[in-house]
Amino acid sequence: MKKNKPKYKLIIDAAVQVIAENGYHAAQVSKIAKQAGVADGTIYLYFKNKEDILVSVFEEKMGQFIQQIANAIDTKENANDKLLTLIHMHFSQLAADHHLAIVAQLELRQSNPALRRKINQVLKPYLQVIDSIIQEGIDENIYAADVNITLVRQMVFGTLDEMVTNWVIKEGKYNLVEQAEAVHALLTEGLNKR
């Protein structure tokens, strides 16, 4: 499988850097190849075109991102702790890789509708993790039983997404990870059983 070959990872990592530094539209395949240290033609052994590279970047990086979050929340005792862990890891993983944050928050949004649909498919497992945390909180009698899980998920993801986008636009001039507890407190205030 191509994904297990060493050059695949080199190309993915190079694409993140080139797209972040040049923007998706100006990120030529030749620039990605040069950054990866491979011949231009080598790119096409792994990817159909530049759009395929962008989707693959998102699949690969988001797959790792989701798996790390899922593993971390599995060790937590209750929904509140799981939600705080998810928020903290969402912020810390993107804060640790500024190029990836630029690609995820800015460049992926400038893509065409077909590409956005593919990206939304990649995001589904992450949204399901959020749903499961909210459902667990309801089941544990921590969160109100009448909360609309879909609405809460949109609020959680939307808040995290906007926080990271703002951090990227401000060029990481403040500590994003330090915002996790305040964001968690604001989100759970509306969820907590009264």
Image (cartoon, rainbow, N blue to C red):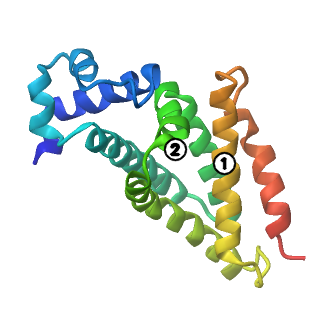
When asked about the image quadrant of residue 95, the answer is top right
Q: Residues within 10 Å of mark 1 (few under 14, many from 20)?
A: many
Mark 1 and mark 2 in contact? Answer it, CB < 8 Å: no
Single out the residue that lies furthest toward the bottom: 146
Could you say where residue 80 lies in the image, as x and y percent from the top left?
71, 62
Could you say where residue 76 lies in the image, as x and y percent from the top left?
59, 59
Residue 126, can we see it? yes
Residue, disc 2: 109
Residue 81, can we see it? no
When asked about the image quadrant of residue 20, the answer is top left
Q: Residues within 10 Å of mark 2 (few under 14, many from 20)?
A: few
Mark 1 to mark 2: distance in Å? 16 Å
Q: Classify residue 79 as left or right of residue 104.
A: right
Could you say where residue 132 lies in the image, as x and y percent from the top left?
56, 71
Name above or below for residue 18 compared with residue 55: above
Could you say where residue 63 lies in the image, as x and y percent from the top left?
37, 50
Q: Give the residue displayed 40% in from the left and 62% down from the top.
A: 121
What kind of element bears circle 2? helix
Residue type of the residue flagged with mark 1: Leu
Badge nearest the viewer, 1 or 2? 2
When asked about the image quadrant of residue 15, the answer is top left
Q: Nearer the viewer, residue 68 or 118?
A: 118
Residue, disc 1: 160
